[in-house]
Amino acid sequence: MLSVAILAAGKGTRMESSIPKVLHKISGKSLLQRVIDTCFELNPDQIFVITGHKSKEVQESIPENKKIQFVIQEPQSGTGHAIQVLCKEVKKNEGNLLVLNGDVPLIKTETLKKLLIFHNSKNADVSVITTKKKGPHGYGRVFLKGDFIERIVEEKDCDDEERLNLLINAGIYCFNWENLSKIISTLRCNNKQREIYLTDTVSLLKNSLSLEIEDNGELQGINNRIQLSKCEEIIQNSIKEKHMLNGVTFVNKASCSISDETEIGKDVIIEANTHIRGSTKISNDCVIGPNTYIENSHVGSYCEISNSTVYDSQIMDHIKIGPYSHIRPKSKIYSYSKVGNFVEIKNSHLEEESKVNHLSYIGDSIIGRATNIGAGTITANFDGQKKNQTKIGKNSSIGANTVFVAPINLGESVTTGAGSVITKDSKDNSLAISRTKQVNIENWERKKS
Ligand code: UD1
Ligand code: MG
């Protein structure tokens, strides 16, 4: 039987934040959600999330799951106190209890599996993941005696000599829950912080063992914004390295960020200052960036998107977007189309080979195949109460500065005169024009002032 307890009740004072520490995000996902996701890969029988500070907010951030139970720790008197509360609340303290700090978000499933195997094979009371850290500042120091952990001393409680010990506690433990529950109530708070430390259990249990691993970044704890940014860097490096090994070029890696869920095909070039978020998929042979932001969108093959922003949209193949385009949600741009400078597209379909090249707003529209939208064209889609649709058939040629007052429906192969305000539907093969005729007054002299 495997139970997991995630410690997530603390305020995170050193974050200097009104947001509970475990709800801070790295690469778009909260620290707590990351730890929970990793735990699920172990297929445990139950997961206890211990909350306290702003517990409602923390609980609401986690999607419902029948394996997850929340335990409230009030007040938050330390990591040992959190487990005291858990042991009291849960009737059956049996099997293995894996305890994870909610602020160590990069721990890998493989490492946790190693810990469980180690723990079971040694029949330990507690197994603690440790590592030698060059800069151990802030971590609890682990002191061994032979094969056993004798004690763990928090940085604040260390004397000068103890502080030189580089072996640190990563905040990840596997306990024999039955044996833990026998000693847990005896923990005291005789330390500098006046807190009940979970780390003191190692001195009270008999068979306390250290599983020392090499730190490849996964043991980084987060107590302040510097460490938050360090974790972001670690996770970004690993995401980008994964893509590079799969055939993606980053022209300036450090200036880009990519979400975990993003999929990128082969021979894609990611130019500088490009940020890809949410669940985005980019197919082969694209050039994305520079200065581009794409969120929750699909981009087909052979696309070029530069200096642009794309949200919740679908871009098919062989499409050029930008520079300076804004593709807003629910847009679908079909193959061989082009969206150019200073163009905003919202909730619209641009069918194959259509072009909106300059200075336009196309909202709630369907633009037919091979239709060219002239510079400065605007769909006036909002009548003050609701949004209305503009429909333009295929092979049409829309003159520069046309305004479509929606709802409006134009047939196929329609032409509009430049500068027209179109308020009436028009049939296939027609010219729609609405503007005053030009008058030339000859021999005109400006009034002298
Ligand atoms: C803790 C360990 C330290 C270890 C480090 C690794 C203790 C006493 N110290 O220190 O040895 O090197 O983690 O990152 O455990 N929490 C609660 N209830 C509380 C207090 C804290 O649930 O009453 C939660 C916090 O939300 C956090 C986790 O426990 O997720 C760790 O607490 P934190 O205060 O960050 O401990 P550290 O000082 O980092
Ligand atoms: Mg911490």
Image (spheres, rainbow, N blue to C red):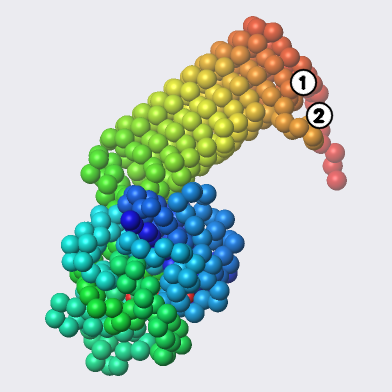
Image quadrant of ligand 1 equals bottom left
Look at 19% across and 78% down and name the residue there. 148
User: Which residue is label 1 attached to?
Assistant: 423
Q: What amino acid is found at the position of numbered circle 2 in the picture? A: Trp
Q: Is residue 306 above or below residue 126?
A: above
Q: Kindly identify which numbered label has been placed on residue 413.
A: none
> Which comes before the other along the chain, label 2 or label 1?
1
Assess disc 2: are there few (<14), some (14-19) or many (≥20) residues with their C-alpha within 10 Å of its C-alpha: few
Q: Residue 163: x percent and y percent? A: 27, 87
Q: Which residue is mark 2?
A: 444
* x 51%, y 34%: residue: 313
Instruction: Tell me: is circle 1 under 8 Å from ligand 1.
Output: no
Quadrant position of the N terminus in the picture? bottom left
Q: Is residue 115 above or below residue 339?
A: below
Q: Which residue is rendered at x = 52% and y = 71% of the image? A: 73
Q: CA distance from mark 2 to mark 1?
A: 34 Å
Q: Nearer the viewer, residue 170 or 410?
A: 170
Q: Secondary structure at mark 2?
A: loop
Mark 2 or 1: the one toward you: 1
Report the front residue among 174 and 104.
Answer: 174
Q: Is residue 74 left or right of residue 144?
A: right
Relative side of 448 to 291, left or right: right
**In the displayed structure image, the side of residue 409 where residue 158 appears, left or right:** left
Amino acid type of the residue tagged 1 in the rendering: Thr
Image point (42%, 80%), residue name: 185
